[in-house]
Amino acid sequence: MQNSFSFSRLWLLIKKQWFDNARLYLLSWLALVGVLSLVFFCWAFFNTGNRYDAEDSFVIFLLFLFPVGFIFANTTFQALGNKAKGTDWLMVPATLSEKLLTGIVYALVIFPVLYTGIFVVIQLITFFLITLNPHNNLSQVRDFWSDLKIAAMFFIPLQAAFLLGSVFFQRYTFVKTVLAIMIIGAVYALIIHFLTRSLFSGHLHFNSLFSVRTWEGDDSKIYSLTKWVTEVSEWVLKYIWTPVLLVATYFRLKEKEL
C-alpha cells in the first residue's frame, strides 16, 4: 500500500480500470446507444400527427440517466463483493484516495459526460430526420442545459449514494442501496412530520422547506426562518450530501484494508 498521493499513479489506475473492464464498458455503451436509438425511433415514428414536442426528449434523458447511472455507480467497487477479486483489488499498489478518485472519475465524470454526449448526438440526428419532412412541426426545447443543471443537483448526490452502496454491501448491492435510500427517506419524512406536528397546531402547509403556513379557522399565519438562515440551509442541503457520502465511502474502503 502506498502512503503518498500521486497523480501519475492515479492516471495509471484510471487506465487500469478501463483495460480491466473495457469489454464490459464497450458492450454497455453500445447497448445504451441501441436502446436510446430505439426509443427515439419509436417516439418519432409512432407520433400521432405532424407536431413533435422537443420537451419530450428531456423526459427520455431523465428516464435513462438515473437508473443507468445508478447501476453503473453501484458496480464501481463490485470486486469487493468477491473475496479473490477483492483481495487483488486491495493489493493494487495505490492509496485508497487514488482508488476512490478512480471510482469518482468513472461514476461522476466519465459516465454523465459520455451519457449526455450520446444522448445529444442521437437527439440531434432524430430532430434532423424529423425536419426532413416539411410538414412536420418540431417545437424547440426551452433550455436543455438549464434543465440539465437541475437534474445534476439530484443525480450527483444519488450517484454518490450508490457509489457508497457498492462498498457498503457485498451482495445484491443495487437492491439493498435502493431499499436503504427509501428507508432513510421515509424516516426523514416521519421525523419532519412529527416535528412539525409537535410545533404547530391545526392545518398546515409547507410553502417551502423553511416556511410553513398554518390555519386556525379563517386565520392563517406564516412561520419562516430568517433570510440568511434560509439561504445557508438551502446551500447546505444542496451541496453537503455528495462530500459526506464520498467521505463515508472512503472510510468504508479503509475498513477493508488488508
Image (tube, rainbow, N blue to C red):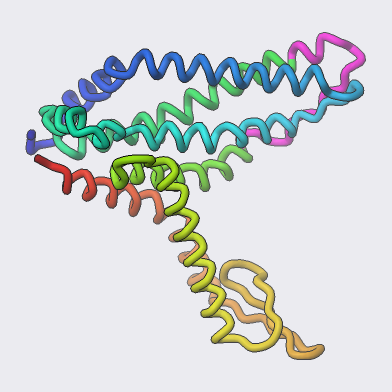
In the image: residue 184, left or right of residue 168: right
Pick the quarter of the image with the N terminus. top left
Q: Position of residue 189 (x, y in %)?
A: 53, 67
Pick the quarter of the image with the C terminus. top left
Tell me where residue 215 sits by quadrant.
Answer: bottom right
In the image: residue 238, left or right of residue 91: right
Point 74% across, 32% down: residue? 56
From this view, report whether residue 191 is shown above or below residue 176. below
Q: Which residues are magenta?
A: 128-145
In the image: residue 161, left or right of residue 255: right
Q: Position of residue 176 (x, y in %)?
A: 41, 47
Foreground pick, 32 / 228: 32
Tell me where residue 151 sits by quadrant.
Answer: top right
Tell me where residue 85 sits by quadrant.
Answer: top left
Point 76% across, 23% down: residue? 43
- Is residue 134 on the magenta stretch? yes
Point 46% across, 37% down: residue? 70
- Is residue 244 on the magenta stretch? no
In the image: residue 180, left or right of residue 36: left
